[in-house]
Image: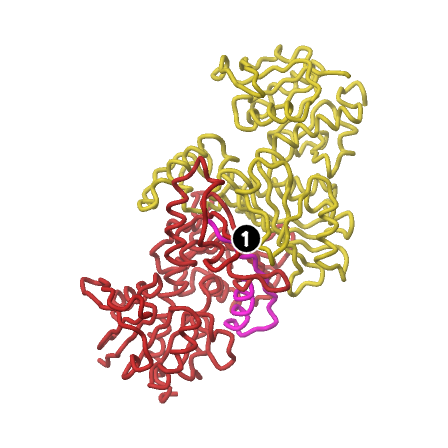
Chain colours: A red, B yellow
């Protein structure tokens, strides 16, 4: 069996660690593995699958002989080092937003648009976490009945904002009685002008605002969804909201499909047939997806599937997934697996 | 000045206590006040505004000479005792869902449909908490531009499920590392077959399900909105979700208005002019409503007002209010105040 030299850039972060876990758990054909991060984290030792790994500083020459380079260290690092990795022959799978909307860069959820990998030029972008789980659940609907409109309101976990945001939620959660006085330094983003407590609160801002009053996170959901589904005509709008949940993004999604006369049961069946999806939808038994139950799970969970009371082509769904796994690390590893399966992991192959 | 004999049924509960607070704070013209509850709570002493009140057992004869009776002790109690209070000449303001959809019972948000009070027969229903804040924010839009469609996803606090649910959130919140193992007995409802932890979780069920897959809470939002806005033609759909927030319901609301060419700024101005509403909507300054900031506030807070990217008459809003105040106690007291102002507090007056 052919094996590969793998590098993870951002190995000291939450997603980087999960990429390493998933590579090992899924028996990715590894010849060698190199953990890379900023000079600040160099020397840190990480344990995975009973082995110890030492993090090295990421430099252009780190990518010599690397076949697959997973990037998850922020857009600025990807912009500088991804081209260096590609130049040295690596297939880069980038989990930042740096290249996602670049027309020359495939933006891929393997269950949804694997065909987009065909023309890659050495770099494949991993979509935004909230977008991945939504398109994974909606693509089988689109294929069966068409999809004209999406209105999504998200319920997003703090782990999407990094390890310090998780620690802040943990410490604030102990201050129940004095909750309004909790100090905050991490959310909406560490770099924000103003910070708000997240424990016992809801913050309707993820990432920064544009002049139209939408956040970058909302535009990511809008634009990435159209790109992945390869259909600019789908109407998409989003409201992205942060909650006191550690891991697991939830989404309340309204859709209008392309056909009349479809039942919720038909929709449920089509979604349940799709790869990587688990339908949890039995109201009588109180079965529906919840983030606390989805933590550390690979699947995208879908429930509360029901017809709109008024619109003949309108349906509502509730979609939950682990934002660090299918929303990030797992999807990145699946992209690499698909490149190998299709024999197109190197630029020279396609 | 004329003064009135007032009774509060359910005085030992969270909303009952807030009704007492609001009556005193707003200088309601009280001659006497009687706190009533089940025999279990009889004898309990409550402090408000520096005075001590002893709770008595609620019986039919408790309502002799009562002018205003506020009910907030569950639908079953209202069904039995509200008719007794009305028979004795009281104006009943009922905060349960027992009579809300009765065609003979006005369902009132005083800023929205005060005219519905005109033909009351002794009983006025206070709407569901989630509904009140939404119609308060949307009515000025409807009056200015028409309103054709509402799609709402809620982010609801545990205080709506009662004092025991608050205590459960408090105790679960200390178990951060072992959060998936938290025991639960209060949510989705105390009487549910299955219970789920609420700390660090999201539960997409409030109240019980019907055969179409909607919960009672969702139908309340759908049906009560149409009744209060006196327009059955408005399309309304709802997804109601419980979060680890103590007090303060948030709502992500999509609307379609009746006119083209309206800007977000025009909508913002119309909403800001309405009574009881505070617009907090300056993304550049990170100003938007949040439940932790709305706790103990009387107003309905509205922000994130923006046009849908695709629909010419579509807008998104983020609406937050204290579910125990404007969502319950405050609105009930405002109904009583309006009855006095209009001189129609007794059945014999109208």
In the image, what residue occupies the spot 35% across and 73% down? A70
Where B72 falls versus A183 (above or below)?
above
Quick one: label 1, few (<14), some, or many (20+) residues within 10 Å?
many
In the image, what residue occupies the spot 63% across and 44% down? B301
Where A58 falls versus B82 (above or below)?
below
Residue topped by disc 1: A204
- Give percent across and percent down for residue B199: 41, 43
Using the rendered image of the protein, determine whether residue B64 is visible from the camera's viewpoint: yes
The quadrant holding residue B36 is top right
The quarter of the rendered structure image containing the N terminus of chain A is bottom left
- Between A316 and B271, the residue placed more toward the observer is B271
The quarter of the rendered structure image containing the C terminus of chain A is bottom left
In the image, what residue occupies the spot 47% across and 43% down? A200
Where A46 falls versus A294 (above or below)?
below
Chain hosting mark 1: A
In the image, what residue occupies the spot 51% across and 40% down? B157
Count of labels in the image? 1
The quadrant holding residue B50 is top right
- Give percent across and percent down for residue B16: 57, 25
- Look at the numbered disc 1 and give the secondary structure of its residue: loop
Residue A161 shown in magenta? no
- Between A93 and B75, the residue placed more toward the observer is A93
- Between B336 and A168, the residue placed more toward the observer is A168
Residue B5 left/right relative to A35: right
- Give percent across and percent down for residue B127: 64, 35
Residue A24 left/right relative to A288: left
Stretch of the chain drawn in magenta: A218-243
Where B295 falls versus B142 (above or below)?
above
Residue A224 shown in magenta? yes
């Amino acid at each position: 069996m052919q094996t590969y030299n793998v590098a993870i850039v951002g190995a000291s972060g939450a997603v980087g660690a999960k990429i390493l876990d998933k590579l090992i758990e899924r028996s990715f054909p590894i010849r060698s593995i190199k953990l890379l991060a900023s000079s600040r984290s160099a020397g840190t030792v990480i344990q995975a699958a009973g082995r110890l790994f030492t993090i090295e500083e990421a430099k252009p020459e780190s990518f010599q002989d690397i076949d697959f380079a997973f990037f998850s260290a922020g857009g600025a690092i990807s912009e500088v080092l991804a081209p260096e990795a590609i130049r040295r022959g690596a297939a880069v799978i980038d989990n930042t937003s740096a290249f996602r909307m670049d027309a020359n860069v495939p933006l891929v959820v393997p269950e949804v648009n694997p065909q987009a990998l065909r023309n890659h030029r050495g770099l494949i972008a991993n979509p935004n976490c909230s977008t991945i789980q939504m398109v994974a659940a909606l693509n089988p609907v689109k294929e069966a009945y068409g999809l004209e409109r999406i209105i999504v309101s998200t319920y997003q976990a703090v782990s999407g904002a990094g390890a310090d945001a998780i620690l802040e939620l943990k410490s604030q959660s102990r201050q129940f009685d004095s909750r309004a006085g909790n100090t905050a330094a991490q959310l909406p983003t560490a770099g924000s002008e103003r910070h708000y407590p997240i424990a016992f609160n809801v913050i309707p801002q993820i990432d920064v605002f544009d002049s139209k009053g939408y956040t970058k996170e909302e535009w990511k959901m809008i634009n990435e969804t159209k790109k992945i589904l390869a259909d600019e005509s789908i109407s998409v709008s989003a409201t992205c909201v942060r909650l006191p949940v550690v891991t697991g993004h939830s989404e309340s999604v309204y859709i209008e499909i392309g056909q009349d006369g479809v039942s919720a049961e038909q929709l449920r069946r089509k979604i349940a047939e799709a790869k990587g999806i688990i339908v949890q939808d039995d109201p009588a038994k109180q079965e529906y997806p919840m983030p606390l139950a989805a933590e550390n799970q690979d699947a995208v969970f879908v429930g509360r599937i029901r017809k709109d009371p008024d619109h003949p082509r309108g349906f509502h769904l509730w979609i939950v997934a682990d934002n660090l796994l299918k929303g990030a690390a797992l999807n990145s590893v699946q992209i690499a697996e698909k490149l190998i399966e299709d024999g197109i992991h190197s630029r020279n192959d396609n």
